[in-house]
Amino acid sequence: MQRGEKSERSRRAVLDAALHLFSHQGYRATTVRDIADRARVSTGNVYHHFPDKEAVFLALIDQYLEITDTQRFPFMRALHSTPRFPDNIEELGFAARASVRQFRDYLALIYVDVIEFGGTHIQKLYADMTERFTRFFEQQGSLDEIRARLRPNVSPTDALLLTTRLFFNYFSLEILFGVPEPFGKKSEEMVHEIADILRNGICAR
């Protein structure tokens, strides 16, 4: 094994160990020694790759950002499939569930950051999401078409952001925090109900 490959493998082991520990026991309760022990490397090896523990945490946040912009992320696959937004709200709901299930440890880091850092590190996540959705609509050439299907003054980007947050928050409750049926209904039923409310609103017309 060449030196560069060995170094990358040990860096990957450190990140994998830190992801598990941060997401299961929090940031402050995890020490560099804990990370090294779980990764089966020395603490010196951890510091070879990262100057401090916070740098490891930041690297994981950045890693999650990269994943969410690829086809590895179920929600992104659904966003690029047909039918397009807003016809695919239900598909986005089920893709949000799949995303939380597959990347639950990364999602847990968001809540760790909110609790232990006041949300300092994840501000970029939400800023990036806004830019990403705007860019997506522009690349699809569908902004005017979507605007024509929404109420006047409703931004397509804001509509997609709201849809995303509703579904991810719902499934974070159910999957990350182990709250079964948080709205008192099966999740499949709630996906369709949330989609109906998003499309039609809550007030009589």
Image: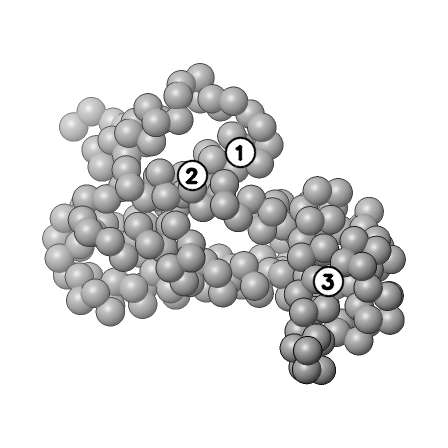
Say whether marks 2 and 3 touch (CB < 8 Å): no
Give yes or no for contact between labels 1 and 2 (Cβ–Cβ under 8 Å): yes
Circle 3 residues within 10 Å: few <14, some 14–19, many ≥20? many
Q: Which residue is mark 2?
A: 97
Q: Name the residue beneath numbered marker 1.
A: 175
Residue at the limit of the structure toward the bottom, as seen here: 3
* In the image, residue 10 above or below residue 100: below
Q: Which residue in the structure is indicated by mark 3?
A: 14
Residue 159 screen position, x and y as percent? 30, 48
Front residue of 154/69: it is 69
Of residues 16 and 145, which is closer to you in this image? 16
Alpha carbon distance from label 1 to label 2: 8 Å
Q: Earlier in the sequence, mark 1 or mark 2?
A: 2
Q: Quadrant of residue 35?
A: bottom right
Q: Nearer the viewer, mark 1 or mark 3?
A: 3
Q: Is residue 58 visible?
A: no
Place residue 51 in its image quadrant: bottom right
Task: Give, as a three-letter code, the residue at label 1.
Answer: Ile
Q: Dot 2: what SS?
A: helix
**Residue in view at x 84 percent, y 55 percent:** 37
User: Callout 1: few (<14), some (14-19), or many (20+) C-alpha neighbours within 10 Å?
Assistant: some
